[in-house]
Every structure is written in C-alpha cells, then in structure tokens.
Image: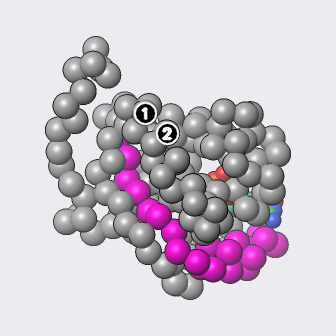
Amino acid sequence: TERTFVMVKPDGVQRGLIGDIVSRFEDRGLKMVGGKFMQIDQDLAEEHYGEHADKPFFDGLVDFITSGPVFAMVWEGQDATRQVRTMMGETDPAESAPGTIRGDYGLDLGRNVIHGSDHEDEGANEREIDLFFDEDELVDWDQIDAPWLYE
Ligand code: GTP
Ligand code: MG
C-alpha cells in the first residue's frame, strides 16, 4: 500500500468541487488519512513547485496556487500515486479524457483544478506529504471495506 499527496487547487475550491473530488477517491476505494483546508504562502508554493523554478510559467503558477485556499489531502491505497494521476487526467484539461477530473472540470492548462504527486518522480509522494503535513496530522485507521477492496 502507498500514500500520495493530493490537493484541490484554488480554482477547484472556488468552484465548489471539493466534495465531488473527495467522493471520487472514496468511491474508488482509496482511504483518506489526512486532510486540511489551508492557504499556501509564497515560500511553500515556491518549494512545492521548485522543479519548475526556471520555467516561464513559474511566477504565474505560484501566484495562482497562493491566490486562495486549497484543500490538501493524503490518500492511501494500492498503487495510490499512479491511480490518482490516472483519475486526474493529463496536465492540460484540454487533453484529458471525459471521466477524468481535469477532463470533466477543466478547460485551461493554468486552471487545472487538482494536484497529485507525480508517480514518475520517485519519492515525490512522500516528499510532498512531508512538506504539507506533520506526522501527527495523519490518521492511522482501519477501512471497514478493505477485505472487499483487496484480494
Ligand atoms: P501538478 O499536479 O500541478 O504538479 O500538475 P502536473 O504534475 O500535471 O504538471 P506539471 O508538474 O508538469 O506542471 C505543474 C503545473 O504547472 C501544471 O498543473 C500547470 O498548471 C502548470 N503548467 C505546466 N506546464 C505549463 C505550461 O507549459 N504553461 C503554463 N502556463 N502552465 C503550465
Ligand atoms: Mg507536477
């Protein structure tokens, strides 16, 4: 089992999509082990998106992610990082299939509703969890339907 970091971005919060996005992961069988509604400050934004520091869109990205509250979450389950990325769709909502979160709710690359740790970037999930959550903010609990989700 694996944990991954997921965040409803400021556009998703303003558009009232938190509940729907949480429902999708619950319905899939993933288990939420952390969640907080928060405002990202400049330092956290620059660290979180540090891999893009030299890109032309970096300043706009940091401005956007700090422009309003986000809902940060940790989800746990089998192959969670990859499964969440698949459910999110492509980086660009215009390229995302209907049925994916970005394909259902987004139109524009810079307003793509949700973040999830990159499964191709080894350890990104744990790094991002550590960046956003203290250990005592994560809850260890038993999911009652686990035997019906996992062989
Ligand atoms: P995140 O979950 O936000 O990290 O998205 P991602 O992993 O699918 O994409 P990536 O990490 O490559 O890019 C981070 C964010 O930068 C994306 O979510 C986009 O909003 C934005 N972004 C990426 N590429 C471009 C680009 O070419 N132009 C602009 N304007 N924004 C971009
Ligand atoms: Mg990324």
Please state, as top left, top right, bottom left or bottom right, where the C terminus lies in the image.
top left
Q: Residue 79's spot in the image, x, y percent?
A: 42, 33
Depicted 116 relative to depicted 43: above or below: above
**Label 2 crowding class (10 Å Cα cut-off): few <14, some 14-19, many 20+?**
some
**Label 1 crowding class (10 Å Cα cut-off): few <14, some 14-19, many 20+?**
few
Count how many numbered circles sit on residues in the image. 2
Q: Residue at x 61, y 68 (%)?
A: 14
Q: Residue 124's spot in the image, x, y percent?
A: 48, 54
Colouring scheme, one of rainbow, by chain, secondary structure, one colour: one colour
Q: Secondary structure at mark 2?
A: helix
| Amino acid, disc 1 | Asp
Residue position for label 1: 27
Q: Residue at x 57, y 41 (%)?
A: 85
Asked if residue 39 lies in the magenta stretch, the reply is: no
Q: Residue at x 80, y 52 (%)?
A: 107
- Mark 2 C-beta closer than 8 Å to ligand 1: no
Foreground of the two, 47 or 132: 132
Q: Residue 27's spot in the image, x, y percent?
A: 43, 33
Q: CA distance from mark 2 to mark 1?
A: 5 Å
| Amino acid, disc 2 | Arg
Q: Residue 62's spot in the image, x, y percent?
A: 65, 77
Q: Is residue 39 visible in this depiction of the protein?
A: yes
Residue position for label 2: 24
Magenta stretch bounds: 54-76
Please give left or right for residue 136 compared with residue 73 in the image. Answer: left
- Mark 1 C-beta closer than 8 Å to ligand 1: no
Q: Secondary structure at mark 1?
A: helix
Q: Is residue 119 visible in this depiction of the protein?
A: no
Residue that extends furthest to the top in the rendered view of this protein: 151
Q: Residue at x 62, y 73 (%)?
A: 65
Depicted 96 relative to depicted 130: above or below: above
Q: Are marks 2 and 1 in contact (CB under 8 Å)?
A: yes
